[in-house]
Amino acid sequence: MPIHDVKYKGLLSPSSYYHTHSGEIIVKDAEYSVGEEVVRLQVAPDQAGERLDRYVTRTIDTISRSYARQLIEDGHIQLNKRFTKPSQPVRSGDVILVRRPVAQPTNIEPEVIPLNIVYEDADIVVVNKAAGMVVHPAPGHTRGTLVNALLARYPDMQVSGNLRPGIVHRLDQDTSGLLVVARNDQAMRIITEQQKARTMHKAYLAVIDGRMKDLAGVIDAPIGRHPVDRKRQTISATGRPARTHYQVLEELGDYTLIEARLETGRTHQIRVHFASRSRPVLGDQMYGPRKPRATFGLKRQFLHAYKLGFTLPSSGTWREFTSPLPEDLQTVLAKLRAVAHTR
């Protein structure tokens, strides 16, 4: 029989975990992200050689084979602290960590909040998100989000999901720019498939602290959750593959304006990748220096999703949308240019 245990179980109150009828211990939250059930499994000798997805399905009877495959592909299941593929055979003694998102309440309150709509049709909406707006409800941000505003503007939205209906990809709270939202399940499937196939074009403008050695290049470094600070991401050998293409657009003295294009879409990817090169995004309070040498009046990170391209679900035609730098970033860029030109 597989072994089921929980790290730090003795420090948890009884309300923080529970046993299922199949024997495993489920941890609610604990040291992991809010909204996750976490199961730790150890492979018994008589289960060696089985595919990972099949092993998970046989061990946790509430997870179907297709759902297990999805969890593995989305990075919610690790084999010996490493991400892998559904067909990977398991060995005796292997440790498997299953992080299963917990279904959240669906009673999201629609709120009338002004939105900058760049494009809309019966299937999708392209929004130019303002800095400071959270994309979807989460603990601590249940109102005032983009999802709240979308449900008020489009009450007929019919997309399966809990707290993220229609959200294909996200932008950080203090990152501005373009993102696409699906208005129905078919559009959600089509757009999501494009994202997984990496045919969607997503490009950002950023100012980084320092200069890049090469005028163009690729940062290829896996990203995973920080082992101590769960709100942060970090470069990790056990993380998920992450690739960022960049091109220098303008050198501004000690700073650089770049275009960053995402090949993958990991959380905080651009911010983590450039910070790992000691070139943090200007104004980044999480990954930048604690005491930056200058802020230029910037109240957030200088990061803007300025270009978004994909195939429309309705017609199958390719469309590309652009968004100019918002006023606060234009002001900072003007200051940087002025300082650079006086040197």
Image (cartoon, helix red, strand yellow):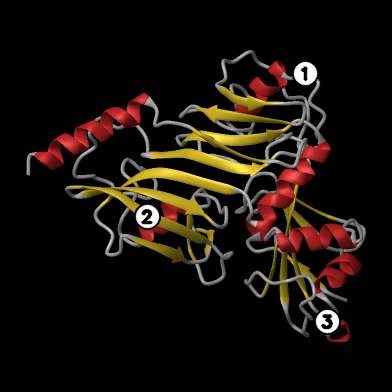
- Mark 3 lies on a secondary structure that is loop
- The front one of 291 and 16 is 291
**Marks 3/1: CA distance?**
50 Å
Give the residue displayed 58% in from the left and 31% down from the top: 140
Question: At label 2, which amino acid type do we have?
Answer: Gln
Q: Residues within 10 Å of mark 1 (few under 14, many from 20)?
A: few
Question: At label 3, which amino acid type do we have?
Answer: Ala
Left or right side of 3 for 305: left
| Residues at discs 3 and 2 in contact (Cβ within 8 Å) | no
Q: Quadrant of residue 109?
A: top right
Mark 2 vs 1, N-terminal side: 1
Q: Which mark is residue 247?
A: 2
| Residues at discs 3 and 1 in contact (Cβ within 8 Å) | no
Where's residue 13, x and y in %? 69, 49
Q: Which mark is residue 155?
A: 1
Q: Nearer the viewer, mark 2 or mark 1?
A: 2
Q: Residues within 10 Å of mark 3 (few under 14, many from 20)?
A: some
Give the residue displayed 90% in from the left and 59% down from the top: 64
- Mark 1 lies on a secondary structure that is loop
- The front one of 6 and 66 is 66
Mark 3 vs 1, N-terminal side: 3
Q: Quadrant of residue 88?
A: bottom right
Where's residue 70, x and y in %? 78, 58
Mark 3 vs 2, N-terminal side: 3
Give the residue displayed 64% in from the left and 51% down from the top: 30
Left or right side of 313 for 281: left
Numbered label tally: 3
Q: Name the residue tied to disc 3.
A: 44
Is any atom of residue 114 visible in this view?
yes
Q: Nearer the viewer, mark 3 or mark 1?
A: 1
**Marks 3/2: CA distance?**
50 Å
